[in-house]
C-alpha cells in the first residue's frame, strides 16, 4: 500500500482536523480586475435601484392609501434619474457603487435638512430610507463558500472569507503561502481552527481526505486510520487550558493590579465569551463585523453591534475601533481607492480618504455612546492632524444628530499606537484621550518585515528588543501626559511576553478570550517589574 504523503509547513493555529479537501482557486489580479470598472459599478447601482423600486411598489400595494402615498413618493424619487446620475458621477471618479450612492445621497440629505421650507425638510427622512434600501440591495459580491467541516487548501484565505464560513462542524486550513502573523491566522487561533501555513505548493485534488496535524505543522494526504487515531489521541491527552476565572483584574506576585479586557472580532465571539472574566472590551475590530461595502455604509448595522457589545459589558468600558480596512483586510467593491498595501491607504488614512464612510460609522458610534461606557479607538494614526480631522468629523456628525433630534453623546476618542512615528512622538498627540499599543503592526513597521510575509518571518518578532524599547519609551511619554494606556496587540495574549510587557510598564492588557486563563496565571507568576515571582525579595 502506498505511503500517505506528508507535507511540512508552519503551525499557525494548533489542533487536529480531518476532512475532505476544498481546493480554492488562486485569487489573481485577473480575478480582482472585474471588481472595479465604471460599467460594472454603474450596472450594480442601476440593478440595486431597480430592486428597491420593485420592493417598494410591492409593499405599497399591500398598504392603505395614506401609507402607500409615502412609498409612492420614494418610488418617484428613485425613478427620477437625478439621484442615480449624482452617484454615477462619483463612480466615474473612482468610487464603488455603494460608496458612490451613500456619498451622493448623504450630500443630498444634508441639503434637504438645511432647506428653509419645513415641508421639504420633513422629506429628509424619506431620502434616508431610500438611501438605506438601495444600500441593502447592493449586497456586494457573495463569497463563494465551501462545505462545512472541510479543509480549506489554497494559496491564501482572506479574513472576510474565514468569517463568512460556518466553522461549527470543524474543519481546518492549509495555505501554500500565508503566515502565522496574518489576521486570518489570528482569527483561526481565536476560534480554535487548526491551520498550517507556508507548505509550498503541492498537488492535491478536491474531495480527497486530509489530516491537518497543525500542532506538528503537518498535513497528511489520504492518511491511514492508525495515523488519524494517533493524532486524535495526542489531542485528547493534551492538557486543557485552565477554565477562565471571574474578575477583570489580576494581581502580580508583588500585588500590582492588572486590568484584563477582551478582544472581540465578531458577534460569535461576543456570544461565546463570559463577560464576568473581563473588565470590558479593550478592542472590538469592526472591520470583521461587516461583509460588504453595503454593510459598511449601513449605520444601523454599526449601531446594533455596538449596542450588543455594550449590553454584553454592562457598565464596564467598551473600546470600539473604527474600521481598519486595507492591508490584508480589504473590502472588494469599495472602489478604486481600496488599498491592499500595509504601507498605503490603510486604517484612518482610508477613513479620511472616504469621509462618507467615516461619517456613517461616526454617527453609529455617537448614537451608541448615549447608551453606555463606549470609547472610540482610531487605527493606524501616524500624525496628530489625522486625529484632529477625525475629531472634527465626530463633532460635525454630533451636530447633525442633535439637529435631527437623535439621542447621541460624544465618546472619548483615543488612538492605536502601532506606527513607530506616532509611538516616538506620543507627547504630540495631546488630543488623544487614551492610547492602545498595537504591537502586531508596530513590530512589522519597526522591523521592516510585513506581518504576512513568511520569507521575513524571522525578523517579524513582536518582542524584539527594538519593539520592547520603543514600548517602554512610549509608555513613559503617555504617563507624563497622564493618559490611560494599554496593549491590544497579540503580544498581550502570549504568556511568554508578559514579563517584557510588565517591565515596559503596561498595566492594562486586552487579550484573546481563548488565552485569558493562561495570561492570568502568567501575570500572577510575574512581578510588576517583569522579574519572575520566584525572584521576589
Ligand atoms: C495591532 O496592530 O497590534 C492590532 C491590534 O491591530 P490589528 O492586528 O487589527 O492590525
Ligand atoms: Mg494594527
Image (tube, rainbow, N blue to C red):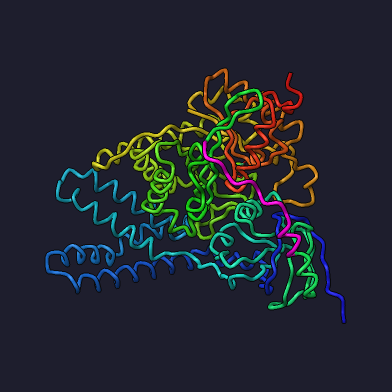
Would you identify the image quadrant in which residue 250 lies? Answer: top right
Which residue is nearer to you in this view: 289 or 150? 150
Q: Position of residue 39 (x, y in %)?
A: 48, 67
* Residue 499, image x, y percentages: 71, 31
Residue in the foreground of this view, choosing between 317 and 284: 317
Identified at 29% across, 71% down, the residue is 55
Magenta stretch? 232-247
The correct choice, above or below, for 502 with respect to 363 in the image is above
The quarter of the rendered structure image containing the C terminus is: top right
- Ligand 2 resides in the quarter of the picture at top right
Residue under the point 63% across and 29% down: 423
Q: Position of residue 391 (x, y in %)?
A: 43, 33
**What secondary structure predominates along the stretch shown in magenta?**
loop
Q: Is residue 441 visible?
A: no
On screen, residue 18 above or below 360: below
Q: Residue furthest left?
A: 65
Q: Within the magenta stretch, is there residue 233?
A: yes
Amino acid at each position: 500500500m502506498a505511503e500517505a504523503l506528508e507535507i511540512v509547513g508552519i503551525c499557525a493555529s494548533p489542533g487536529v482536523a480531518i476532512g475532505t479537501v476544498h481546493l480554492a482557486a488562486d485569487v489573481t489580479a485577473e480575478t480582482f480586475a472585474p471588481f472595479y470598472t465604471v460599467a460594472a459599478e454603474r450596472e450594480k447601482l442601476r440593478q440595486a435601484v431597480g430592486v428597491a423600486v420593485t420592493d417598494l411598489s410591492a409593499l405599497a400595494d399591500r398598504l392603505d392609501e395614506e401609507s402607500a402615498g409615502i412609498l409612492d413618493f420614494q418610488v418617484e424619487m428613485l425613478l427620477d434619474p437625478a439621484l442615480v446620475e449624482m452617484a454615477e458621477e462619483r463612480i466615474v471618479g473612482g468610487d464603488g457603487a455603494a460608496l458612490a450612492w451613500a456619498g451622493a445621497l448623504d450630500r443630498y440629505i444634508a441639503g434637504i435638512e438645511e432647506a428653509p421650507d419645513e415641508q421639504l425638510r420633513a422629506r429628509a427622512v424619506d431620502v434616508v430610507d431610500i438611501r438605506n434600501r438601495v444600500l441593502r440591495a447592493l449586497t456586494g459580491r457573495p463569497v463563494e463558500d465551501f462545505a462545512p467541516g472541510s479543509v480549506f487548501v489554497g494559496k491564501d484565505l482572506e479574513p472576510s472569507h474565514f468569517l463568512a464560513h460556518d466553522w461549527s462542524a470543524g474543519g481546518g486550513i492549509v495555505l501554500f503561502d500565508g503566515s502565522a502573523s496574518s489576521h486570518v491566522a489570528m482569527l483561526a487561533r481565536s476560534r480554535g481552527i487548526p491551520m498550517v501555513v507556508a507548505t509550498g505548493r503541492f498537488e492535491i485534488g478536491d474531495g480527497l481526505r486530509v489530516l491537518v496535524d497543525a500542532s506538528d505543522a503537518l498535513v497528511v494526504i489520504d492518511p491511514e486510520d492508525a495515523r488519524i487515531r494517533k493524532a486524535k489521541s495526542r489531542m485528547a491527552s493534551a492538557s486543557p487550558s485552565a477554565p477562565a476565572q471571574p474578575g477583570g483584574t489580576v494581581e502580580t506576585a508583588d500585588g500590582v493590579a492588572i486590568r484584563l479586557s477582551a478582544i472581540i472580532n465578531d458577534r460569535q465571539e461576543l456570544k461565546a465569551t463570559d463577560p464576568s472574566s473581563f473588565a470590558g472590551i479593550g478592542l472590538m475590530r469592526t472591520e470583521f463585523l461587516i461583509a460588504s461595502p453595503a454593510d459598511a455604509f449601513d449605520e444601523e448595522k454599526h449601531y446594533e453591534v455596538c449596542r450588543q457589545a455594550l449590553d454584553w459589558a454592562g457598565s464596564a468600558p467598551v473600546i470600539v475601533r473604527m474600521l481598519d480596512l486595507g492591508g490584508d483586510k480589504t473590502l472588494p467593491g469599495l472602489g478604486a481607492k481600496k488599498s491592499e498595501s500595509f504601507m498605503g491607504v490603510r486604517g484612518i488614512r482610508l477613513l479620511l480618504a472616504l469621509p462618507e464612510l467615516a461619517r456613517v460609522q461616526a454617527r453609529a458610534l455617537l448614537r451608541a455612546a448615549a447608551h453606555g461606557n463606549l470609547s472610540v479607538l482610531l487605527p493606524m494614526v501616524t500624525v496628530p492632524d489625522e486625529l484632529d480631522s477625525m475629531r472634527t468629523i465626530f463633532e460635525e456628525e454630533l451636530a447633525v444628530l442633535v439637529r435631527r433630534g437623535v439621542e447621541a453623546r460624544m465618546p472619548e476618542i483615543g488612538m492605536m499606537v502601532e506606527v513607530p512615528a506616532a509611538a516616538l512622538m506620543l507627547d504630540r498627540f495631546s488630543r488623544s484621550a487614551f492610547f492602545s499599543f498595537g504591537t502586531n503592526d508596530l513590530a512589522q513597521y519597526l522591523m521592516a518585515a510585513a506581518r504576512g510575509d513568511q520569507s521575513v518571518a524571522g525578523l517579524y518578532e513582536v518582542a524584539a528588543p527594538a519593539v520592547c524599547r520603543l514600548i517602554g519609551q512610549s509608555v513613559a511619554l503617555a504617563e507624563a501626559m497622564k493618559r490611560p494606556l494599554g496593549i491590544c496587540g497579540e503580544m498581550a495574549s502570549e504568556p511568554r511576553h508578559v514579563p517584557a510587557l510588565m517591565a515596559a510598564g503596561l498595566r492594562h492588557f486586552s487579550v484573546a478570550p481563548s488565552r485569558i486563563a493562561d495570561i492570568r496565571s502568567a501575570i500572577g507568576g510575574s512581578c510588576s517589574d517583569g522579574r519572575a515571582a520566584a525572584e521576589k525579595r
